[in-house]
Amino acid sequence: MQVSTHELKSKIIESLKLQDITPDQIDDDAPLFGTGLGLDSIDALELVVLLEKDYGIVIKDIEEGRPAFRSVKTLADFIAAKRPQ
Amino acid sequence: MNEVSIFAASVVNPADLAATHLVRRLGQRFGRLDLQSQLALLAVESLELDFSGWARDRIGICLATGTGSLSTDVSFWQGWNGVGGPSPTLFAYTLPSAAIGEIAIHYKLTGPNLCFVGDDQIVLPEAFDLIRRGEADGCVCIFSEVVSVELAKIIPATPAASAWAIFLKRGDGLHKLREFDRDMKALCTLIFQIKSAV
Amino acid sequence: MREPVVAIAGCGAVSAVGCGLESLLNALRSHLLGLGPSEKFSSPRFQSNLVGAAPRDQDDEDPAWLLAREALQQAVGAAKTIKIPPQKIGLILSTTKANIEALERVSAGRPCSKAALRHLQSNLLAEDLAKEFGIRGPVQAVSVACVSGLVALSQGVKLIRRGAADAVFVVGVDCLSEFVVAGFTALKAIDPAGCRPFDAARSGLSPGEAGAAIMLVRDDLTSPTGITLRGYGGSNDANHLTGPSRDGSGLARAIRLALDSAKLSPEEIDFVHAHGTGTSYNDTMESLALKTIFGEACPPVSGAKGMLGHTLGAAGVIETIICTLAMKEKFLPGTLGLTNPAEGAPKSLVRRPRAADRLKNVLKLNTGFGGMNGALILSHE
């Protein structure tokens, strides 16, 4: 089941405590790491926790999550594919 | 020249986190800092220093905290049993010196760092020594005291949250530092009075 | 007037390779692995159960006191011929988590003595250690992440140089705890195969614990070891909270400051004892810093964290003690856990212990979360 990118963006903002930004200001395809939103390695780990807490997805190896974390869209697709039904 | 002076001083508490014009200058990621680091960083920002004329590797940071990072430690540990485990971000702040990292990153200060646990009396003499020995030309001094309601249930302490900051520099300033000047809190009050009188 | 020279008068240690300097020396000579599986961390919530545990009851409620007191007792004993009035003896404690065990106990509703709870606070732990041994001079509790030990040693030197004390006991302690292992697990920073400093296949650290103590003294008072603290440098990368500066420039600056303060050039350094945590980032950064300072002429380098684990606040102190043992006994410690050096790692890495003809000047490095770097130079007259 597809997860709404708006909902995912809200969760990312909340979990990473980003200031002065609304879901509408995050582009679906913009890079999350490096440029774009400028997240770092600790944020990646925090997103791994988010995936388990909110979607029941356990990522054993951070490398497995890397392609999924490229953008909000890739993350939403990853969740739709992996979340337990 | 052997004189060291207080150039600026500030005091902040959690109510000041609502001062959006200052907080906005501290960046989009300010929200992820723990309260202790937020207060320390805000106290330094409130000094309204302009480092542009300075060699950043000649500015030290000297921090002391009353109870280390214990309030954050308690938060981290309480998250231990949650689904997904404890927060990696929070763990990064379970060190008394975490605020030093934040201050160094924000102002690009690459000089020497000191961090103590205990009362505020240690900060100024040690910062003064750094400057006197020639290891730094200026020093950002911070004392922060954060005791959460949760921590106060565990150790005999009263809930509190404040941070004091003083910038010491070689040469002239608002107040020449004397040997017995150790009480950061009192000195911040004194500086505030001096500035108000001007 | 010449500033006093500060020398090492006595040491004490307890760690994964045993209790006492003799055990530590034997372990270094025989390349003994101190890491081992621990029942306490065998739950899947922890990334690995391979840790460097000291020979103590892992269920003790006040391990910080236990380990610190033991080490300090040894150091006091080693220097008992030196007579200094108690008011001129100081104590500096280096620890990141003090007795964090108490927080775990109280949170779980388990019994916890008042003393154990008191030692949750570093400054109170320091006060109690000073009181226990009749130390009545200045007492400081230093906590600067994994560079604490070196900062504490430099503080000891400062106290003596400005006449606030004639001798200072620098005590480093940190204990294995669910708190710390859980934290490193959350950061995915642990190598389940055990810490492999500078190895091509390295993937993280191993948690460890230790108590270590060094008595610093003005060198005109008796100094049996003849080893002095000749220089020190500290700096900050100002880059990222848990990731060191990409190019090692911060650590290189700290080394340069240490060399300048010791009035030594890089060619005069005979051995480097690295921080070498075994994480991808740290060891790469450290290799770059060493390349910047020494070019292709890097002196022998080794690291102890593959043997003892990462002992956090105790690391700077116990690793300095390792340097002094090496200097006195004229040998180079090996680097346990290192099999295939990574590309870019110093060519002069020492894998297994071997004799050294000259160990006059030794450089000890540590770095810590928050971008902090420390470099200490020891000299043997």
Image: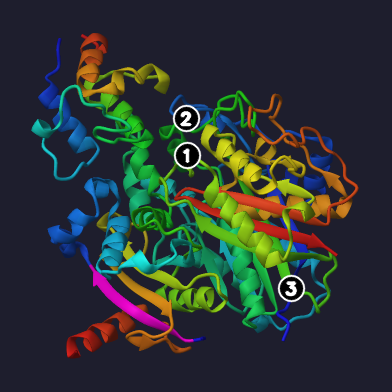
Q: CA distance from mark 2 to mark 3?
A: 42 Å
- Looking at the image, residue B165 lies above or below residue C357: below
Circle 2 residue: C46
Image depth: mark 1 or mark 3 in front = 3
- Amino acid under label 2? Phe
- x and y percentages locating residue B112 in the rendered image: 51, 63
Residue numbers of the magenta segment: B3-12
Local packing at callout 3 (Cα closer than 10 Å; few below 14, some 14-19, many 20+) is many
Chain of the residue that carries numbered disc 1 in the rendered image: C
Query: What kind of colouring is applied to the model shown?
Result: rainbow
User: Which is nearer the N-term, disc 1 or disc 2?
Assistant: 2
Circle 1 residue: C178
Q: Secondary structure at mark 2?
A: loop
Circle 3 residue: C217
In the foreground, C244 or B35: C244
Identify the residue at image location x=19%, y=22%: A29
Determine if the magenta segment contains residue B75. Answer: no
